[in-house]
Amino acid sequence: MRLAHNALVLALTCSVLFAGKKADTKQKELEAWAKSLDKESVHKAVMAAELDLLGEVADKTRPVLVVYFEDLDYDVCLDLVGSLLDAKDKLSRAVFWQFVFASGDFVVQHPDQATEKYAYMLAGLESALRGYEHVLDRKPREKRQFLDELLALRTEGRLGEHIRANMCAKN
């Protein structure tokens, strides 16, 4: 519960900090503030989003996390998550962003493994799937075929095969 509270404070601080300012100034201040966050605050925000992908905290912290992770040197292998990014529904997009943020969070939390793509992609995909499961716990009708297939692979112990088969090459 404390994790969700800390992330909510982070999200609300962001909202209040920028209310009523011009868009340009607002964006620059958001970027500077997001880049100044410590890794523990970011980790708490990523974990809180996992617990409620469709909630207000996740919605408000995603823009901050995009800025925080944009300069981090890690690959986001889109083939791992199918067409989630192109999906029009909120859940698919939220799962995609959870994959991105949790992968980056792994890199930040485990700098000794920052170049191990498999490790951080597994962490990101696991977090995204846990987030999806949390949504299904509250809204069982929100099922997505592709995500259910990934859950089945995880249950069968074959999620690693999916990652290896869809590993992207560094540009």
Image (cartoon, rainbow, N blue to C red):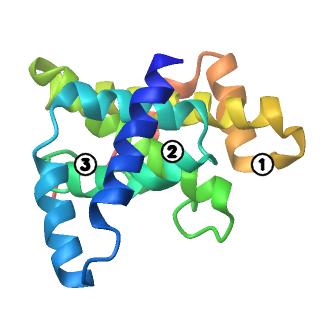
Q: CA distance from mark 2 to mark 3?
A: 25 Å
Circle 3 crowding by C-alpha within 10 Å: few under 14, some 14–19, many from 20: some
Residue at image position (22%, 73%) is 26
Number of marks drawn: 3
Q: Which residue is mark 3?
A: 75
Q: Is residue 97 visible?
A: yes
**Nearer the camera: disc 2 or disc 1:** 2
Q: Which residue is mark 2?
A: 57
> For the residues marked 2 and 1, what is the alpha-carbon distance in whole angstroms?
26 Å
Which residue, given by chain and number where applicable, does mark 1 sit on?
145
The C terminus is located in which quarter?
bottom left
Task: Say which amino acid is labelled 1.
Answer: Gln
The location of residue 164, given as percent across then percent down, is 40, 34
- Residue 162, given in percent of the width and then of the height, sits at 52, 35
Comparing 94 with 147, the one in front is 94
Q: Which amino acid does the dot numbered 3 rest on?
A: Asp
**Residue at x 51% of width, y 44% of height:** 57
